[in-house]
Amino acid sequence: MEYVATAFRRHSEVLSAMLIRAIDSRRESPFHTLGAILEPLTLMAVLGTLWYLLNRHQTVPFGDSVLLFYASGIFPYYFFVYVSRRMRLQPPKRRFPIERRLDHVFIHLVLRVFDYIVLGLVLFGGLYFFVTRDAAPYSLIPIIESAAALLILGFGWGLLLIALNKGFPLWRFLHPSISRALILFTGIFYIADFMSPSARYIMSFNPLVHAVALFRLGFYPSYPTLLLDKWYLFVCAVGFLVMGFVLERVTLTMEGKRLVRPSA
Amino acid sequence: VIVFDQVSKKVRKGRVHQVVLDNVTAAIPTDRHIAVLATSKVERSAFLQLLAQVAVPDHGMIYHDAVVSFPVGQLNGFAPDLSSRLNVAYLARLYGRKVGSTIRRVEKYSAFGSRLDLPFGALSPTQRDLLANVVAFALPFNFYILPRFPALIEKNRRLETLFTRRMRKAGMIVPIRERLALKYCNTVLIVAGGRLYRFDDITEGYDAFRRAVA
């Protein structure tokens, strides 16, 4: 029992040291973080402006405010992208022996979650005060469920990406484009339930569609849920996580063997 | 002590696999100053990486019953864009030591002054080398792993003082020449043919090693 307590204390010391350093790094160069957070806000502003300039005579896809509709789709999508992107297993040449590879991933997750809590408060708080009172969530439970699922999904996908990047170098160049294109097939700008049955069936395989629908349910109590399958979403999230962990262990063994080249 | 329990390790050298350790069970004393000798650089490097927990064995387990340093002179985890001061604070926190006293010790023995506030990446290679050694010995470990003997110890009086102070209580393992081993070490450990051989007499150890490689 004492051994477990000591190990836990050491591990928390290591993680807190890494967290403090990450915060120091952000303080030294804040623009990198700000840029990543501002991306969804910029997209929202551009889409909102375009809507009012070009499309204002049309009805909003759902609810009273087009900005809230877009925000409730863009926010969960970018949360997933931001969690899974730039996740790195620090190579041994870039860390001290006491730091473990997954520690860096864990710190990455903590910082991303913190960023998106702040972004969520700014985005929906701003919409609440300046655009529509509907921006205050009707129920927090579906929002938390969706965010938890996206966190697990993003974590697992991020770990898988690391392995894919190592195994297939071309993937490193293809993935950002695929990830950006995915925004069109996630039901952010339209309601997936109103698509034709065949399109709906194909889209139902995308777990992000379910996550976006679940997130919107927190703002719109009457949001269509024909397509929403929470069970599928969580099975996908856990499945990705398990596959990610398995591949992380496999690459760890590879790293152990590759490591022992003479440093001289 | 560091206990090797049926440890096996192979490394790739070109197209062939070289055996570093073959089912070795041994206890490495962490209160001794050990000169490590190996028939090849690859073997020696792999053995030290196993001790420093940088590499994992292919089979068997290694148990550490002492606080072992990171490889001295290698500040791999330092962020080049952060100041050396913040990096030292990070390292102190990482190993559960007090930040203030560690920074004061580094300031005292490196004599860096305001250069400690420069980004680590902006330091010259010589400055980085000095800082890497001072930082390692500023942290109190039970056992220091030195991938090579720092030449600066012989040249820099402050570093030598810090090193001597640490070595009064701690152990170390270092690949080193016989002349320096006679001055700084009291044990010889030979890694050869997948086995470990220990000698508590320096001259006897180096003679045995010369016979083995002849």
Image (cartoon, coloured by chain):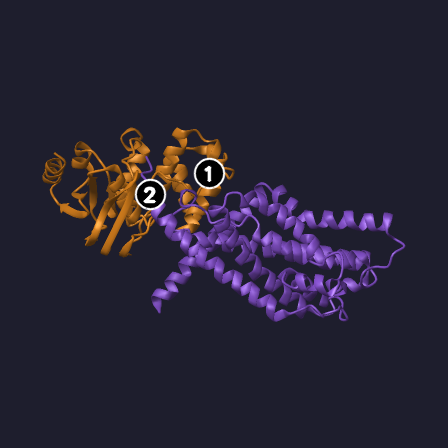
Chain colours: A purple, B orange
Q: Residue at x 88, y 53 (%)?
A: A56
- Tag shown at residue B71: 2
Q: Which mark is residue B172?
A: none
Q: In which quarter of the image is residue B39?
A: top left
Horizontally, residue A69 falls left or right of residue B16, namely: right
The residue that mark 1 highlights is B84
Residue A207 in the image: above or below residue B108? below
- Dot 2: element: loop
A95 relative to A41 in the view: left or right: left
Chain at tag 2: B
Instruction: Pinpoint the chain carrying mark 1.
Output: B
Compute the Cα span from label 1 to label 2.
Answer: 18 Å
Give the mark count. 2
Q: In this view, does A217 lie to the left or right of A178?
A: right
- The quarter in which the N terminus of chain B is drawn is bottom left
- Residue A114 appears in the picture as rendered: yes
Name which residue lies at 43% across and 29% down: B124
Return the residue nearer the eye: A24 or B110.
A24
Instruction: Identify the residue at the far right of this view.
Output: A57
Find residue B195 and report its horizontal and vertical position in percent. 17, 48
Picture residue at 60% right of the left edge, 61% below the top: A150
Q: In which quarter of the image is residue B42?
A: top left
x%, y% of residue A154? 57, 57
